[in-house]
Image (cartoon, rainbow, N blue to C red):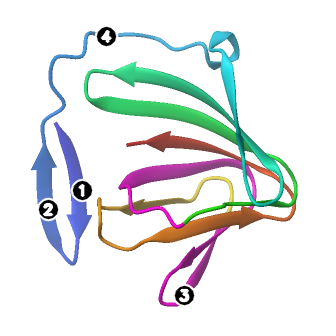
Amino acid sequence: MWWCRSNGRAFIRNIENIPFGVTDWASVPRSEHKGTTGVAHWRTAQCGGIRVRMVEYSPLYEADHWCSKGHILLGVSGELETELTDGRRFILTPGMSYQVADDAEAHGSSTRTGATLFIVD
């Protein structure tokens, strides 16, 4: 079971039908995703209905779209700036995470220095 706390309330979501597995991210093939500037390299594992990714953003990466997909992100290295459509901005550094639901708050990301993120969606 996975617990998430929001506004003081706890929610439970079951993660089902995924056998135990270990992922050696270095052995997962990379796919390239160009931004408005820079590039993102994704290493993707599909675990049932859950996509798990290790994403490496190049320096000066800027997303070419607003994303409405829900994610849980953990900063592994570097620094990622995320902007919401209402203008709020957040800086994610190693050891920090954020979470957002599907269709809740569209967001776009960029990095001056490059960043590596662990993403579950």
Q: Which residue is mark 4?
A: 20
* Helix, strand or loop: magenta stretch: strand
Circles 1 and 4 in contact, beta carbons < 8 Å: no
- Residue 84 versus residue 27 in the image, above or below: below
Q: Is residue 80 visible?
A: no
Q: CA distance from mark 1 to mark 4?
A: 22 Å
> Residue type at mark 1?
Cys
Circles 3 and 2 in contact, beta carbons < 8 Å: no
Q: Which residue is mark 3?
A: 88
Q: Which residue is mark 2?
A: 10
Depth order, front residue of 105/91: 105
Q: Is residue 49 visible?
A: yes
State the SS at label 3.
Answer: loop
Q: Nearer the viewer, mark 3 or mark 1?
A: 3
Question: Residue visible at 57% across and 59% down?
Answer: 96
- The tag earlier along the polypeptide, 2 or 4, is 2
Question: Residue visible at 62% across and 14% down?
Answer: 28
- Would residue 54 appear left or right of 105 to someone viewing this image? right
Q: Which residues are magenta?
A: 66-91
Circles 1 and 2 in contact, beta carbons < 8 Å: yes
Circles 3 and 1 in contact, beta carbons < 8 Å: no
Q: Which residue is mark 1?
A: 4
Q: Quadrant of residue 87?
A: bottom right
> Residue type at mark 4?
Phe
